[in-house]
């Protein structure tokens, strides 16, 4: 399975010419991974806010790579390369390990309910020992499984539906939460919503942008919110940037929002500050 996936990803890369910048990034990435505890890597956290109470209920962990010469390398550049080179496995483990450590620190600081979401790559999901790994990270940090949520895109699930389904069912049976990320932007096979143990549906930013003035986006999003309510799946609107978008989502009773309007992704220290300051959306 792993070989098959690697082939799919490499074919994607082979059809494009690999630019000198990508080659440079790959070289730097390999060096970074040789350093102890991947010193140039950071995890940022973006708040997810409940629309009824206005409170921060969760944080999405987002990888950042601060390279001395390349500057801040975006995950949209880094992740595909990491997948192509197979380096996503050590990177993915590093993010999971750090996110779990951070959840414990925030619990100890007085925020026991905060959930942290971690993005996964398809390569991680097909590892035979993936479920045990997740359990290990939770146990080592003495965490209840329901404070961790794993975010998967539809495309990740599609790459190996059977393997994704059984792994998701296994980790979900321990109590770990599952979110479908960027919903609506991929294959959107509604069959998953029935077959997979899904707790959260994250509606892709594309549908949210300018939603109040676009009747088609509005129709799709309101249908997703309604569907989420009937299936008891929490809906989170991604990429909320304006008050107008927020008002629309509130009006149609979307459960939660994430976006620059409330906060950009923050370093762990900055995130902690807004927790202590009790920052919330006005309701
Ligand atoms: P994602 O999981 O959908 O994460 C949300 C992305 O949207 C983040 O980009 C975030 O900064 C951005 N965003 C949030 N609110 C807004 C907004 O209001 N407006 C706009 N324009 N953008 C907003 P980021 O951090 O650049 O990450 C991009 C993607 O890289 C993520 O999309 C995720 O697919 C991937 N990624 C990031 N960290 C990891 C990781 O640790 N592991 C894996 N496998 N993938 C990751
Ligand atoms: Mg995500
Ligand atoms: Mg997303």
Image: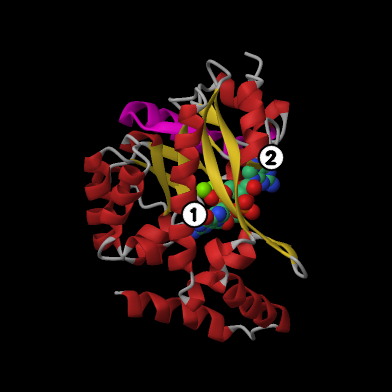
User: In the drawing, what numbered circle is on residue 232?
Assistant: none
Q: How many marks?
A: 2
Q: Going 31% across and 31% down the picture, which residue do you hit?
A: 231
> What is the quadrant of the C terminus in the image?
top right
First in sequence: mark 2 vs mark 1: 1
Q: Going 60% across and 25% down the picture, which residue do you hit?
A: 275
- Report the predominant secondary structure element of the magenta stretch: helix
**SS class of the residue under badge 2?**
loop
Q: Which of 164 and 245 is in front in this view?
A: 164
Residue 91 visible, this angle: yes
Q: What stretch is highlighted in magenta?
A: 213-236
Confirm if mark 2 falls within 8 A of ligand 1.
Answer: yes
Query: What residue is disc 1 on?
Result: 95
- Residue 178 belongs to magenta span: no
Query: What residue is disc 2 on?
Result: 264
Confirm if mark 1 falls within 8 A of ligand 1.
Answer: yes
Distance between the Cα atoms at labels 2 and 1? Answer: 19 Å
> What is the quadrant of the N terminus in the image?
bottom left
Instruction: Please determine whether, in this image, residue 60 is positioned above or below residue 37.
Output: above
Say whether residue 249 is left or right of residue 213. left
The spot of residue 54 in percent (x, y) is: 58, 19
**SS class of the residue under badge 1?**
helix
The spot of residue 271 in percent (x, y) is: 63, 34
- Residue 232 belongs to magenta span: yes
The spot of residue 117 in percent (x, y) is: 46, 42
């Amino acid at each position: 399975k792993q070989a098959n996936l690697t082939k799919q990803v490499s074919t994607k890369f082979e059809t494009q010419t690999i630019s000198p910048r990508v080659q440079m990034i790959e070289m730097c990435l390999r060096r970074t991974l040789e350093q102890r505890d991947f010193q140039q890597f950071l995890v940022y956290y973006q708040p997810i806010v409940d629309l009824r109470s206005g409170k921060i209920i969760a944080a999405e962990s987002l990888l950042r790579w601060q390279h001395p010469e390349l500057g801040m390398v975006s995950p949209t550049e880094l992740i595909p390369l990491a997948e192509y080179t197979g380096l996503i496995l050590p990177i993915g483990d590093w993010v999971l390990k750090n996110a779990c450590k951070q959840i414990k620190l925030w619990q100890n600081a007085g925020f026991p309910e905060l959930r942290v979401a971690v993005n996964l790559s398809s390569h991680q999901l097909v590892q035979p020992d993936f479920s045990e790994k997740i359990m290990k990270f939770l146990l080592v940090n003495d965490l209840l499984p329901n404070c961790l949520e794993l975010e998967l895109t539809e495309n990740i699930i599609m790459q190996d539906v059977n393997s994704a389904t059984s792994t998701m069912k296994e980790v979900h049976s321990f109590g770990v939460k599952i979110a479908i990320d960027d919903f609506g932007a991929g294959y959107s096979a509604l069959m998953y919503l029935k077959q997979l143990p899904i707790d959260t549906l994250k509606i892709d930013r594309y549908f949210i942008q300018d939603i109040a003035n676009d009747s088609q986006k509005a129709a799709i999003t309101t249908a997703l919110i309604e569907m989420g309510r009937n299936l008891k799946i929490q809906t989170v609107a991604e990429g909320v940037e304006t008050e107008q978008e927020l008002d629309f989502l509130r009006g149609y009773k979307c459960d939660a929002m994430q976006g620059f309007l409330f906060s950009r992704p923050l370093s762990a220290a900055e995130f902690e500050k807004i927790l202590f300051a009790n920052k919330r959306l006005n309701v």
